[in-house]
Image (cartoon, rainbow, N blue to C red):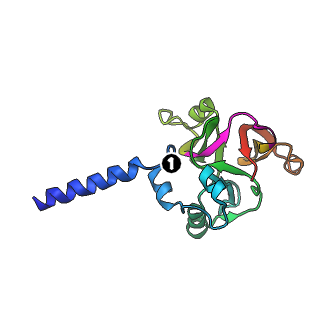
Amino acid sequence: MIRSTKRTVVAALAVSAVAVLPAGIAPAAAAAEPAAAPAASAAVAEEGLRPLIEMITADKKGRFYTLNAAEAATAERVNGFTRTDESEGISMFNREKEGTIPVHRLRLRSGHQAYLLATNPDEIKKLSDPADPERRFEDEGVLGYVYQRSQGDETLRLVRYTKNGDWRVSVENRKDLIDAGFRVDGPLGHAPRS
C-alpha cells in the first residue's frame, strides 16, 4: 500500500511539473534554465526574451546556438565549446508569442560538429525527417521564437549564412561574412532588438 501511494505521488508530481512548462520548452531545458538573468530588466524577463548565445564547436568547424545560459556553460565545460560575441544584440523569445514562429536547432548527424537553425517547416522536415535513414540532421527541437514579419524598428532581420558546413545566424547584410566567403542561406525571421 505504501509503495503504491509513493508511485501515485511521484506520478502526480511529474505530471504537474510538466503541465506548468511554457509551450515549446522541453522539460530538461526548462529545468536547467535560470528564472531570469540577474541583469535582465523585469520587462525583458516578462516578455520571455533571452539573448542568443553563439559558440564555436570543439573541432572549430561549426557553430552552436542556445538561449539557455546553463546549457551554454555545460557545452563549454563538457564539450569544449567556446563562446563568441558574434550574436551580441540578438535576442529570441523563449516561448511562443503572437506573430512568432519557432526556430528549430538541427544537429549535423555525422562528420564535423555543426548546428543549423531553421524556421521553414518544409526545410526542417527535408533535412531531419526521422523516416529518412539518409537524413543529414537531427532535429533537437525548438530553440526559441522570432517574429515572422518585421515589427518595424523594433526588430532585426535574421538570416542564415553558410560556408563549408558552417552555418551562422546573424543580421542581414553582414559584409564581413560575405567577404569571408559565406553566402546567404535563407531568411529566419525577425528578432527583437536587445
Residue at which label 1 appears: 25
Judge whether residue 112 can be spotted in this image: no
Q: Residue at x 62, y 37 (%)?
A: 101
Q: Residue 54 appears in which quarter of the rendering?
A: bottom right
Above or below, 25 against 125 in this view is: below
Q: Is residue 150 magenta?
A: yes
Viewer-side residue, 22 vs 108: 22
Look at the image and give the residue range highlighted in magenta.
142-153
Q: Residue 41 appears in which quarter of the rendering?
A: bottom right
Furthest residue to the front?
Answer: 42
- Image coordinates for residue 51, horizontal then vertical, percent: 68, 56
Left or right: 25, with 169 as reference point: left
Furthest residue to the left?
Answer: 1
CA neighbours of label 1 inside 10 A, class few (<14), some (14 to 19), many (20+): some
- The quarter of the image holding the N terminus is bottom left
- Image coordinates for residue 81, horizontal then vertical, percent: 64, 64
- Image coordinates for residue 148, horizontal then vertical, percent: 69, 34
Q: Is residue 35 magenta?
A: no
Above or below, 1 against 152 in this view is: below
Helix, strand or loop under label 1:
loop
Left or right: 151, with 142 as reference point: right
Viewer-side residue, 28 vs 41: 41
Q: Residue at x 84, y 49 (%)?
A: 177
Q: Residue at x 33, y 53 (%)?
A: 14
Furthest residue to the top?
Answer: 122
- Image coordinates for residue 97, horizontal then vertical, percent: 60, 40
Q: Amino acid at mark 1?
A: Ile
Viewer-side residue, 92 vs 78: 92
